[in-house]
Image (cartoon, helix red, strand yellow):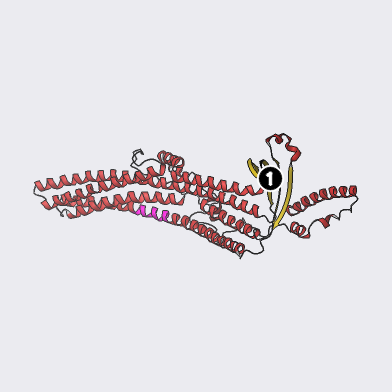
Amino acid sequence: MACMGVLRDYTIKSLGRNRISTVTEERTGAMKSPPLFGTIPVWILGLCLFACAPYKANESRPPPVEVPESFSASGSPKAYEDRWWVTFEDPALDAFVAQAHTDNFDLAQAWARLEQATALARQAAAGHWPEIEVATGYSKSQSNFSGGDRLGTFSVTAERIPITIGAAYEIDVWKRISSLKRGAVLDMEATREDLESIAMTLAAQVAEAWFSVVEQEAQTRLLAKQQETGRTFLELTRLRFSQGLASALDVYQQRQQLAATRAEVPLVESRKEVFRHQLALLVGDPPRALVTPERDKLPALPPLPPTGLPSDLLTRRPDVRSAHLRLAAADYRVAAAVAARLPALRIGAETGYESRDFDEIENIFDNWIWSLFANITWPVFDGGRRKAEVERNKAIVKESLGAYGQAMLRALQEVEDALIQERKQAEFLMELERQVGLARDTLREARMRYANGLSDYLPVLAALESLQTVERSQIVAERQLLSFRVQLY
């Protein structure tokens, strides 16, 4: 229908011109005008008849990879919430994510890139409208002429006051402008998906940083308890040494163990401040300006959410959606490059007025002039430049198709990695809990044997160090379990 519309408009205008021409010729006694199709150049008629897009872009390409039917841990067709961080039931985390989504500068840059892409889309859409220009000016000149001995030399002063209005419009015969516009719109939508991806990644980074701060707080609390335990054991060895039941070596060994525990405190405090600075950067605050609430216990792991179907990643993950949109945009640019090799039809009009004196402006419509034009340009030879542009854009489509497939594979891998890591980390954490129980039992037994004089202090020292090490590892494992859940989301 769009192809026939161009032909219909051209025919109506031609009929109008023929009617005027016929009336004029009849009044002057001239020959009658030729038939309608005799006045339309055959090449224009053929161009209008075949005015359809020579290359059709495809916006719904399937992913170039085989998508499995389900994930290893869940196959529910229902996906989890977008605001996944609220499942941890941590008001501080909710507040930090909200602040990051408002004040983070990386996100602000992404918003600016979206504004740029939106402006480019509007710029591409402007090709569907005619260009109208209004121009005016003023010039004054003086010329000297010689009239010989009789007339002498005289001067002529001239003023020019032109006023012109021009309009030009390219008829989108081969859908070149439409393809450029659609490609720009798809680029804008892909940029919006990039913004969503940055926002999602930012929420994950905030959660990771906040949980790291809490982890170091928990380690600080644990180290304080372990130092208290170490001091208790030191008093025990001193008492036994004073009674002649222990050697000085036992006292020195316990002092060394207590000193080693104290040495961990500055490192934990350093890491806590670094993670706090990182959190401040993410929420858009200077490093020392962020105030975090005191929290020395990590939140409990929420129940495993339904992961949905692997095919849902095409519509749920913004990075996959972005890759798909950019693939379609590249395909539309191929269509535009192909259309650029074909004839272009442009029409236009110009009207205006030119006066030689300001006094004549009041009679502006008496001397008004106008002109109409239409032209077709056909790039017959350009050294292969336009053909090379088509090939370049086709290569970009191939590259974008590969990027789309890679994004899909990466998404599938990340979900499966997070599922298996979380499952195995939970198993590891259960084993650590058993180790903590066994280490406490071992320490109790070693201490009892030492108090009864059945062994020296070395088994007590080994059991104490083992218990404290596994307690610290338990906090790290709990933190890592939360991290795998964040990665899954």
SS state under label 1: helix
x, y percent for residue 31 = 89, 54
x, y percent for residue 100 = 44, 42
Query: Per the image, is 428 magenta?
Result: yes
Residue visible at 80% across and 56% down?
40
| Type of the residue with mark 1 | Asp
Residue found at the far bottom of this picture: 383
Left or right for 187, reference 413:
right
**Residue 311 visible in the snapshot:** no
In this view of the protein, which residue sits in the foreground, 347 or 257? Answer: 347
Is the residue 231 above or below the residue 183 in the image? above
Q: Report how many numbered discs are placed on residues in the image.
A: 1
Residue visible at 89% across and 53% down?
32
In this view of the protein, which residue sits in the foreground, 420 or 349? Answer: 349
Residue at the spot of label 1: 149
Left or right for 138, reference 253:
right
x, y percent for residue 292 = 36, 39
Within the image, what quadrant is residue 239 found in? top left
Query: Per the image, is 175 magenta?
Result: no
In this view of the protein, which residue sits in the foreground, 351 or 460? Answer: 351
In this view of the protein, which residue sits in the foreground, 218 or 232? Answer: 218
By secondary structure, the bulk of the magenta-drawn segment is best described as: helix
Residue visible at 68% across and 48% down?
168
* Mark 1 closeness class: few <14, some 14–19, many ≥20 residues within 10 Å: few
**Residue 463 visible in the snapshot:** yes
Is the residue 324 above or below the residue 367 in the image? below
Within the image, what quadrant is residue 158 found in? top right
Left or right for 225, reference 285:
left
Which range of residues does the magenta coloring cover?
A: 421-431
x, y percent for residue 299 = 39, 43
